[in-house]
Image (spheres, rainbow, N blue to C red):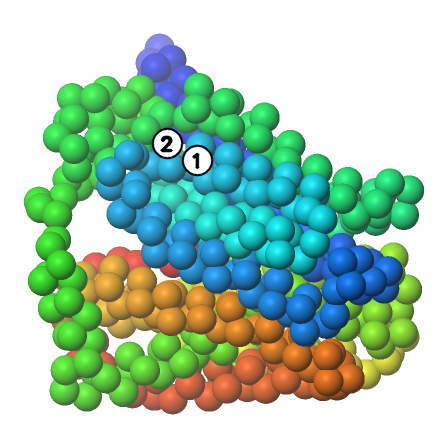
Amino acid sequence: MSSSPAPTPVAAHGSRLAFLVVGLCWLAVLFDGLDMFIYGSVLPHLLATGTFGLTPDQAGDLGSYATFGMLVGALAAGTVADRIGRKKLMVACVTVFSLASGLCAIADGVAVFGVGRTLAGVGLGGLLPTAISMVSDYAPRGRGAIVIGLLMTAHHAGGILSAYVAKWLIDPVGWRAAFWVCVLPLLFAPVLAKLLPESLSFLLAKGRTDEARALAARYDVELPAARTGKPGAADRWTNLLTLFRGGEWIQTLLYWLASFGGLLLVYGVATWLPTLMRAEGYELGSALSFVVVFNLGGIVGMLVAGRAADRFGAPRISAVWFALTAAGVFLLSVHMPMTVTMIVVFLTGVFLNSAQTMIYATVSIRSTAAHRATAVGWTSGMGRFGAVFGPWLGGQLLAADRGDWGFTAFALAGVSSMVFIGIASLRTPRSAGRDSEPQELVTAH
């Protein structure tokens, strides 16, 4: 009697270890999301109690400090990771944003609090792209895109956690306790340092091929293709200039403008949703419940966006998603029954977060292999200026006693992104059809 051979214990053990790596990165991104969303969750209380004498325009500036720090962290992440390794960078990022939250917790004024939020943003911005690279290296065979989508759910799970932390702690203990909770990930840093292996791509780039092969065999994952050489500054500028040659500059600017509006919308809503909902007449507890529902929608959206894009095309899905987001955000300016409002908030979360992801997917699919990293990176970088502008814009509107225009302004940003990505999808870039290699879902914030 014959039977098929059972999986080898080594392969099974390696598979479990690979999931351990993904799990550790998921927890790191969960803490990233908690730290990112906690400011928006405590902001209604800070404004209502006049903490630090905080005004709405100052609150908007503080929100922008964190997103500016994220811009710096994201831009520096690649260079730093190439020098010290992705594992060490992840540990450093968790340490930085945890300690920065401690600085916010002990702050005695707006200036110190602002420094804390800026430093937290640096850690937050550096962690996410590094974690994505790590799980790409160690994802089970053929599961890269699914695992990246799963990783991004952790960011929204952190947003849900931030709302509950604020609801449970602000009234009985005070707002500082919420930021002390955000210091707790510091205890997770030694766990990362001990259990997380180094990136396979980093080991190959450093010529540590034998070590990379041993890790790939142990974790039962495919060894990434070794980089043939590190591009110099001249190569990077050449790749960037390629995006503007001929008629490509129109396509490139359309992507950048769509990304600017998309991240303005994402971070503007993430910062001001509880405050704007409270301005619409909802109690603080209800306003924080909207944060939970919004991020639940974000989790669902990340899980379904890739499948929808595979079937209907990423550019089309991005345009439709932004249109639905704009409609949902605008409806939030209308006081509706609680059940209807919850449904609108949930659907807005579904479409908003994955609409921006589809911009990156569109750029990735429509770029040649030689210029893909440059195209996606610069589209994300230009979008991050929108991430800085969004929280500031909300604060300015509230300071001018135009809080009722907040949702309308964010809805208009969604409409603009819909228009820009829609026009871009109608154009046929010269690179189309020249690169047929399969694409995975590109996920970044």
- Relative height, residue 307 to residue 269 (above, below): above
Indicate the secondary structure of the residue bearing disc 2: helix
Direction from residue 12 to residue 393 in the image, left or right? right
User: What's the mark number on residue 309?
Assistant: none
For residue 36, side relative to residue 217 (left or right): right
In the rendered image, is residue 245 in sight?
Answer: yes
Secondary element at tag 1: helix
User: Callout 2, which amino acid?
Assistant: Lys
Percent from the top left, x then y, of residue 82?
Answer: 24, 41
Quote the CA–CA distance across marks 1 and 2. 6 Å
Q: Report the number of discs.
A: 2
Q: Dot 2: within a 10 Å radius of its alpha carbon, few (fewer than 14), some, or many (20 or more) residues?
A: some
Q: Which mark is residue 92?
A: 1
Residue 405 position in % (x across, y down): 72, 86
In this rendering, is residue 192 above or below 104?
A: above
Residue at 68% over, 47% down = 107
In the picture shown, does residue 92 fall above or below 108? above
Q: Nearer the viewer, residue 58 or 186?
A: 58
Which residue occupies 89% across, 74% down? 281
Inspect the image, locate mark 1, and give the three-letter code of the amino acid beneath it: Ala
Image spot of residue 330 (x, y percent): 70, 83
- Compared with residue 282, is residue 257 higher up or lower down, i.e. above or below? below
Rendering quarter of residue 89: top left
Identify the residue under disc 2.
88
Question: Which residue lies at the image location 27% right of the left edge and 47% below the top edge?
Answer: 79
Question: Along the horizontal axis of the image, is 166 left or right of 186?
Answer: right
In x, y percent, where is residue 288?
A: 80, 58
For the residues labelled 1 and 2, say whether their Cβ atoms are less than 8 Å apart.
yes
